[in-house]
Amino acid sequence: MKIICSPEELTKGINIVSKAVASKTTMPILECILITVTDSEIKFTANNTELGIETIIQGEIIEPGSIAIKSKVLSEMVRKLPSGSVNIEVDSSLNISVTCEKTHFNFIGESGQDFTLLPKVEKEASFMLSQFSLKEGIRQTIFSISANDANPIMTGEYFEIKQDHLRIASLDGHRIAIRNLELNQTYDSASFIVPGKTLIEISKILAGEMDKDITIYYTQNHILFEFDETKVVSRLIEGEYFKIDQMIFSDYQTKVTVNKKDLLDCIDRGTLFVKENDKKPIRLEISDEKLDVMIKTLMGSMQDELEIEKTGKDITICFNPMFLLDALRVIDDEFVEIRFINSKSPCYICDNENNYIYLILPVNYN
Amino acid sequence: MKIICSPEELTKGINIVSKAVASKTTMPILECILITVTDSEIKFTANNTELGIETIIQGEIIEPGSIAIKSKVLSEMVRKLPSGSVNIEVDSSLNISVTCEKTHFNFIGESGQDFTLLPKVEKEASFMLSQFSLKEGIRQTIFSISANDANPIMTGEYFEIKQDHLRIASLDGHRIAIRNLELNQTYDSASFIVPGKTLIEISKILAGEMDKDITIYYTQNHILFEFDETKVVSRLIEGEYFKIDQMIFSDYQTKVTVNKKDLLDCIDRGTLFVKENDKKPIRLEISDEKLDVMIKTLMGSMQDELEIEKTGKDITICFNPMFLLDALRVIDDEFVEIRFINSKSPCYICDNENNYIYLILPVNYN
């Protein structure tokens, strides 16, 4: 195998596929990036068996072949190289020689034969959206997945396609996050559960450009994200997702409109005396034109007051402040609308266009 | 006690004194910042018994008094406050009430009586230099102190005043770092050993301004740094420092001038295959107009070649690459001069004006 590449192309390829390199594993080959060179392309692949990524990089192909190189060594080497084109040559004994200007590195690679290739995903069912929409949709819902593996379904996000709409939802038993995204054409109805880890890595790779699309293919067990020169393959989570529509109510007794930043800052302030794992609730007391915020822990207390616009009944309700913060942090609007039914029922933070709904269960407070 | 301050002044005061707040301690009072309010000033103090810092902040004094507050709580609170002046009030039961706009915090402080005040340092012997010079002098030598407490003297830096010169030196048994700084007047001769930890914290506080001075007072056991509205007090390390002058030779057999960045990058590249705690040396082979750099470990090898200007004999010599990197990283010159005696004797990285000398012992290589 012999190729000549720019350091920029190498860096780009490494940065993309390294998201699928295993970090703690008993199988050393999973810590490698596979470089596969054919007559027509140079491909980088990484696969931690849950998630696999491959991407094509530009470069001059002198001799086809393949080699697996520890991701850490490859990325650090490329970072330390002087500027100038990089010559990578591998002999039949897996000796790798990397030359750039007057610098020569020599080391041993691993055989590409031992590498687990990505599963083949049939390109039958698919839909398309902008990279920006997908990246935003993930950012605005991913915090609501469960960190706990006890129920695997909760560690993923629910993707539901209906005509020209994609709904992304996540829930952890205390809250639900929903984003509705418009697609630019009508597709067959479909739904599946994508592992949260996959979506977190996809987000990191996506530049999030408005004018670039991503195509998503899905089968019974796998999902394939295809964009630019890159393919990301992940298994899907098996099982039936929760009936989200049955959890959402549209009627309410109290509706409050409040400046998002003011509310976020105020609740953040309230967490000062809340130690980790300490489940002290924050109390919201809503009366005409005023929201009183109160929290009291063993360490100290805070009171604050915000201006609001209110319709409906006065209400006093308590929440885990972290759940309110998580939702408020991902909302880009200047003002948010919060709907309440009563002090035992969830509140809904939403917008008028139904682009997002954040449902949060209240906490009992004595 | 009652004061009204701007959040900026509070933040400034906290940032300065927090460098002397103890982090892991069995004495909770050492985790506090002491606020002392007299009729004329508001003073913040922190003291971890090794290092003590006090600083004056601006604000309106309504009632004198004192209170000790956990540094972490105070700094997080100030960070979370809305903008607007901050009212801090303490009653006789140590109840603290902090009010800013419509936000109220209530919590309990610790008695100022329990706080260990800074030792009094007699202002007899002193010298002065710019904050910039001191900060730079520390940065360019501090990496050579020993991390190992076995010999306490090596964990400090040697300050030596002779007429209108200050020499700062550090050594760890493998290398010596020396910076010579000019003072703008003549002082009595003096020398003392300042704990490295103190100097690291002082560096962080100093803005490093060229046109602002710092006055340094010293006694048998203590050192006091006085600048702006701040005082930093530290004990000195007892003992006699090494005879540095006896370790420095001015004759040499080989002198090399090389582009600093090129050499730094090249040696950094060489560390790719050096694992932590792995003491693989890097080999420098100096011949006319060429420096060959070579390193070989179990993981792989690197060769590189740099252009140099050389006078004197050819020489081959090996070093711990980390020691070369540490010195090269703090040198601001475009070119460095390295002097060699033979392959068993230390090399000297220095400039013609003798502003700095970095002496590094070679490593045996078979």
Image (cartoon, coloured by chain):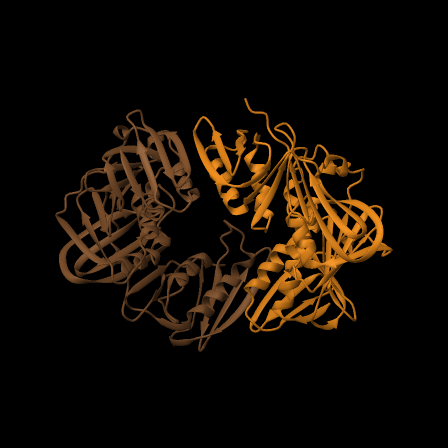
Chain colours: A orange, B brown
Residue A242 in view of the camera:
no
- Point 53% across, 36% down: residue: A288
Residue A12 in view of the camera:
yes
Question: Residue B90, how many percent across, how many down?
Answer: 30, 31
Q: Say whether residue A133 is left or right of residue B61.
A: right
Asked if residue B339 is positioned above or below residue A270 in the image, the reply reads below
Q: Quadrant of residue A299?
A: top left
Q: Quadrant of residue B361?
A: bottom left
Q: Quadrant of residue B34?
A: top left
Question: Residue A171, how many percent across, how many down?
Answer: 69, 38
- Point 55% across, 63% down: residue: A80
Q: Say whether residue B340 is left or right of residue A29.
A: left
Question: Residue A87, how many percent across, how many down?
Answer: 65, 71
Q: Say whether residue A77 is left or right of residue A55.
A: left
Q: Residue furthest top?
A: A366
Work out whether residue B360 or residue A16 is closer to the camera in this orientation and state it. Answer: A16
Work out whether residue B189 or residue B47 is closer to the camera in this orientation and state it. Answer: B47
Q: How many marks?
A: 0
* Quadrant where the N terminus of chain A is found in the figure: bottom right
* Quadrant where the C terminus of chain A is found in the figure: top right
- Point 31% across, 45% down: residue: B13
Question: Residue A172, how many percent across, how many down?
Answer: 67, 36
Asked if residue A260 is positioned above or below residue A341 in the image, the reply reads below
- Point 42% across, 72% down: residue: B258
Work out whether residue B277 or residue A234 is closer to the camera in this orientation and state it. Answer: A234
Work out whether residue B292 or residue A12 is closer to the camera in this orientation and state it. Answer: A12
Q: Say whether residue A210 is left or right of residue B206.
A: right
